[in-house]
Amino acid sequence: MTEAAERFDPVVREMMQANRANWDARTPVHLASRFYDVEEQPDPFRWFAPFEWEDLGELAGREVAHLQCHLGTETLAFARRGARTVGLDISGASVAAARDLAAKADCTVDYVRANVYDAVDALGDRRFD
């Protein structure tokens, strides 16, 4: 599989590498922050306002792909609402943290490390609602 970055010119590839490094560096900061508050059992429902949940509708039984999921907190919220979820993020550090948070929450979520431009290849034959 050719990564999307290889299809772009060198300037864009450099920006993508900088973006990945930036999110890798942010991950431990966000894990320690009060905003994300992941030290305790995270409350996945706080990530959306009531009207957003209404707009999303019933998630039970749906297949949901959450692109650029970072720590996967919202991805967990989808899973807690009954969706079969997969989170995708460019940052390996974020994906590792998201997997840890899902395990801590005893929640089944699949996380994939990939550039969003590679999502179709990275997620394979899966189809999403």
Image (spheres, rainbow, N blue to C red):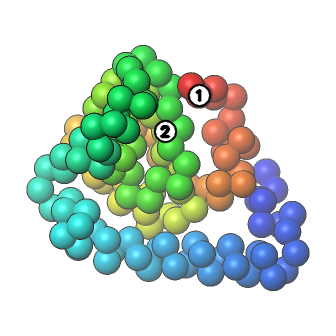
* Few, some or many residues within 10 Å of mark 2 (<14, 14–19, 20+): many
Q: Which residue appears at 52% of the width and 65% of the height?
A: 91
Q: Which mark is residue 86?
A: 2
- 79 displayed left or right of 93: left
63 above or below 76? above
Q: Quadrant of residue 59?
A: top left
Is residue 102 visible in the rendered image? The answer is: no
In the rendered view of the protein, which quadrant contains the C terminus? top right
- 30 displayed left or right of 85: left
Q: Residue 97: horizontal and vertical position, in percent?
A: 35, 60
- 90 displayed left or right of 38: right
The residue at the far front in this view is 51
Q: Which mark is residue 90?
A: none
Is residue 17 visible in the rendered image? The answer is: yes
- 26 displayed left or right of 115: left
Q: Amino acid at mark 1?
A: Phe
83 above or below 121? above
Q: Nearer the viewer, residue 32 or 55?
A: 55
Q: Which residue appears at 71% of the width and 41% of the height?
A: 120
Label located before the other in sequence (2 or 1): 2
Instruction: Give the label, 2 or 1, closer to the camera.
Output: 1
Q: Which residue appears at 72% of the width and 54% of the height?
A: 117
- Disc 1 target residue: 128
Q: Amino acid at mark 2?
A: Val
32 above or below 104? below
Q: Residue 62: horizontal and vertical position, in percent?
A: 47, 21
Q: Are marks 2 and 1 in contact (CB under 8 Å)?
A: yes
